[in-house]
Image (cartoon, grey):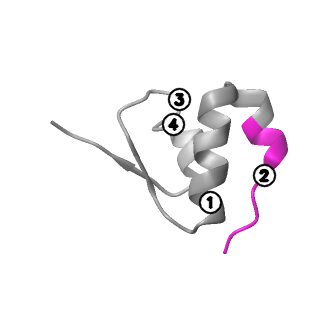
């Protein structure tokens, strides 16, 4: 399991996005989202994100 960069999460993401990222990281599961903050390149460097495409 990768260690969360909590400073990044707190500085960049809002409360709900931070919670989603932290839970996904804790259970070692990718986040599947269309949310711009969660799919941002900076977020992808810290958290495993899969972009959802319709």
Q: Would you identify the image quadrant in which residue 36 lies?
A: top left
Q: Residues within 10 Å of mark 2 (few under 14, many from 20)?
A: few
- Of the two numbered discs 2 and 3 on the same chain, state the one appearing first in sequence: 2
Q: Earlier in the sequence, mark 3 or mark 1?
A: 1
Q: Position of residue 44 (x, y in %)?
A: 53, 49
Q: Is residue 41 left or right of residue 2?
A: left
Of helix, strand and loop, which one carries label 4? Answer: loop
Residue in the picture at 75% in, 57% down:
4
Determine whether 49 is above or below 54 in the image. below
Q: Which residue is mark 3?
A: 37
Between discs 4 and 2, the one toward the N terminus: 2
Mark whose residue sits in front, 1 or 2: 1
Residue 31 within the magenta-colored segment of the rendering: no
Depth-wise, is mark 1 or mark 4 nearer the camera? 1
- Taking the image as shown, residue 30 lies to the left or right of residue 3, namely left
Q: What is the spatial separation of the Cα atoms under label 2 and label 3, in whole angstroms?
A: 15 Å
Q: Residues within 10 Å of mark 1 (few under 14, many from 20)?
A: many
Q: Earlier in the sequence, mark 1 or mark 2?
A: 2
Magenta-colored span: 1-9
Disc 1 target residue: 25
| Label disc, if present, on residue 46 of the rendered structure | none
Mark 3 to mark 1 CA distance (whole Å): 16 Å
Q: Which residue lies at the image location 69% right of the left edge and 27% below the top edge?
A: 15
Within the image, what quadrant is residue 42 found in?
top right
Looking at the rendered image, the quarter that the C terminus falls into is top left
Q: Which mark is residue 5?
A: 2
- Mark 4 — residue? 38
């Amino acid at each position: 399991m990768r260690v969360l960069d909590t400073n990044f999460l707190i500085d960049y993401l809002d409360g709900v996005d931070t919670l989603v990222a932290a839970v996904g990281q804790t259970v070692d599961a990718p986040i599947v989202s269309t949310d711009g903050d969660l799919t941002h390149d900076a977020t992808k460097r810290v958290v495993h994100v899969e972009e959802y495409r319709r």
